């Protein structure tokens, strides 16, 4: 007999044990708080499951979720689980970047083939032209269920088709099975020490694995409430995140490294006294991008007066192909930094992580950088449309290891992630990580936004380094800003930058989760897309061409 998948079983059990307890909340921009109990969530999810079943009949096609952040996204997701169909986390066209988000959605739909789109009336009304051009069947999540028997989703069924961010290549759909989800959520709960007494707060987009699995599914599965915020509200007012932590008694919340940096900068500009109580915040996870020791130290120094305990920091590393979490652990402020990078904790105890030479694939010793490989129950077995299994798998001693494409090293059992294999720049035989160059380019530069892209191009037989930055004062002495970028990078890393592009906000392309798209930036540069913005050319003269 088929065993019901853990996520649906957990929701049903929570409903039976505590039907009126709060499952999740959503904070609207106007301050209104919408709430769903476990019983209400299950009832709404069943209505959605009935609608999917009626629409698809027996097709069992993937269901693309096009919802703004909120409770509708959560109920639609669980509706897919109850209907036994793969949910595809996506997002409606971004009003600030409609071309970019629309292109990503088009690529996802092209990759999926036959699919169903599930959305709500607001999205359908706001984007009639865009949604009207889409080929899959389009449904609005509403209606009353009939007496229809729903399938029982099993542990081996696909729960999610989680598309990668596409920061280095085009997005690929990772098949995350219910058993992968259940294992990773159990591991997250165990490492973070969360339980029924915990309270979660999440502003991260529900379309990406950290916001979806870490921020929403983990609390709902374990059985503690989660309050959701729109990512747009955080980006507009970063301190609102901290206010909500204080007001909601949140114990677990977090985001990428940039979120903590942003809070520190915004705090410095605050003119009003802040009344915050961060003393109950005991898990401040930090992941999805490079984790800087200086960020942890600056945030701790800034917000310790409000009760924040630096030991609450939980640096972690993960990727969609491993469901989410690969390693993590609480930060020890007394432990010395390693080249400015904070460690990402220890690997999950029942998985295997190794670091191998990127040249010959042999395991390296502690402290030596190499490519990170991981194997275990959280690791997915294939991408959508890849019948032979994940193309980045490698066999070792009869076991399948995922080649993550990430670089790092182990130090006393702790993983330190240093960058991406695809983003290593070589100059005069020396290796440089793009992220180190980018950080040096903008550190301490008030005239630049804290964002950059570094890459290499071939110019007349030379391998030249190009750095693209964004100015807070576009058009104001770009040549001087570019010269300072070159000097900062040279002093910090020893690398010579050939060309600097200084542009306005939006010049550096990013994924929807905020990761820099270096390869897209490079493609734009090679297509002369930045010619009018070049502030320091390869010849060494300051100029703005064409």
Image (cartoon, rainbow, N blue to C red):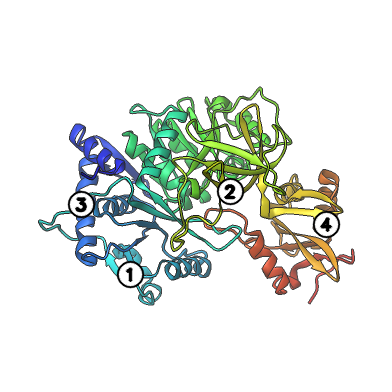
Please state which of residues 4 and 387 is positioned toward the viewer in this rendering: 387
Query: In the shown orientation, is residue 115 left or right of residue 167?
Result: left
Q: Position of residue 258 (x, y in %)?
A: 60, 45
Q: Which residue is mark 4?
A: 497
Circles 1 and 2: CB atoms closer than 8 Å: no
User: Which residue corresponds to mark 3?
Assistant: 46
| N-terminal-most mark, 3 or 1 | 3
Q: Which residue is mark 1?
A: 125
Q: Is residue 381 left or right of residue 507?
A: left
Q: Residue 193 placed where, x, y %?
A: 43, 27
The residue under the point 78% across, 77% down is 546
Q: Residue 8 lies in what quarter of the image?
A: top left
Residue 323 vertical placement versus 114 (above, below):
above
Which type of secondary structure does the marked residue at label 4 adopt?
A: loop
Frontmost of labels 1 and 2 is 2
In the picture of the structure, the residue carrying the numbered disc 2 is 404
Q: Earlier in the sequence, mark 2 or mark 4?
A: 2
Q: Is residue 503 above or below residue 443?
A: below
Do the residues under discs 4 and 3 have CB atoms within 8 angstroms? no
């Amino acid at each position: 007999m088929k065993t019901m998948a853990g996520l649906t079983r957990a929701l049903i059990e929570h409903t039976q044990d505590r039907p009126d307890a709060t499952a999740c909340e959503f904070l609207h921009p106007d301050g209104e708080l919408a709430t769903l109990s476990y019983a209400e969530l299950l009832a709404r999810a069943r209505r959605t499951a009935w609608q999917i079943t009626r629409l698809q009949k027996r097709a069992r096609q993937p269901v693309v979720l096009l919802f703004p952040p909120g409770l509708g996204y959560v109920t639609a997701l669980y509706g897919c689980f109850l209907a036994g169909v793969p949910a595809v986390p996506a997002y409606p066209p971004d009003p600030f970047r409609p071309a970019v988000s629309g292109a990503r959605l088009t690529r996802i739909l092209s990759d999926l083939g036959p699919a169903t789109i599930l959305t709500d009336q607001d999205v359908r009304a706001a984007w009639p032209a865009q949604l009207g051009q889409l080929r899959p069947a389009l449904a609005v999540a509403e209606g009353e269920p009939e007496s229809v028997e729903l399938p029982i989703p099993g542990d081996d069924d696909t729960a999610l088709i989680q598309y990668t961010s596409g920061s280095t290549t085009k997005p690929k759909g990772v098949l995350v099975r219910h058993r992968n989800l259940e294992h990773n959520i159990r591991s997250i709960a165990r490492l973070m020490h969360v339980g029924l007494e915990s309270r979660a707060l999440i502003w991260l987009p529900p379309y990406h694995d950290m916001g979806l699995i870490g921020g929403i599914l983990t609390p709902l599965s374990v059985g503690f409430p989660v309050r959701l915020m729109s990512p747009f509200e955080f980006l507009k007012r970063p301190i609102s995140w901290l206010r909500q932590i204080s007001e909601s008694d949140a114990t677990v919340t977090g985001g990428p490294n940039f979120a903590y940096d942003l809070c520190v900068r915004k705090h410095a500009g605050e003119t009003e006294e802040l009344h915050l109580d961060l003393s109950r915040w005991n898990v401040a996870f930090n992941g999805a991008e490079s984790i800087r020791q200086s960020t942890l130290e600056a945030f701790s120094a800034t917000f310790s007066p409000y009760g924040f305990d630096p030991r609450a920091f939980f640096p972690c590393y993960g990727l969609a192909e491993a469901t989410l979490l690969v390693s993590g652990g609480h930060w020890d402020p007394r432990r010395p930094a390693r080249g400015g990078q904070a460690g990402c904790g220890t690997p999950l105890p029942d998985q295997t992580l190794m670091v191998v030479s990127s040249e010959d694939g042999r395991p390296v010793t502690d402290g030596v950088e190499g490519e990170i490989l991981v194997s275990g129950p959280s690791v997915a077995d294939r991408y959508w449309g890849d019948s032979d299994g994940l193309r980045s798998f490698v066999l070792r001693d009869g076991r399948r290891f995922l080649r993550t494409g990430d670089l790092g090293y182990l130090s006393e059992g702790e993983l330190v992630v240093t960058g991406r294999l695809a983003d290593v720049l070589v100059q005069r035989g020396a290796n440089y990580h793009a992220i180190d160059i980018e950080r040096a380019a903008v550190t301490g530069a008030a005239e630049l936004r804290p964002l950059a892209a570094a890459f290499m191009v071939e110019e007349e037989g030379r391998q030249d380094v190009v750095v693209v930055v964004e100015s807070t004062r576009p058009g104001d002495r770009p040549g001087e800003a570019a010269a300072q970028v070159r000097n900062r990078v040279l002093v910090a890393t020893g690398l010579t930058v050939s060309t600097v592009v200084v542009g306005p906000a939006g010049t550096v392309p990013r994924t929807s989760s905020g990761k820099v798209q270096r390869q897209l930036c490079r493609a734009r540069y090679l297509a002369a897309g930045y010619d009018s913005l070049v502030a320091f050319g390869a010849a060494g003269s300051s100029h703005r061409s064409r």
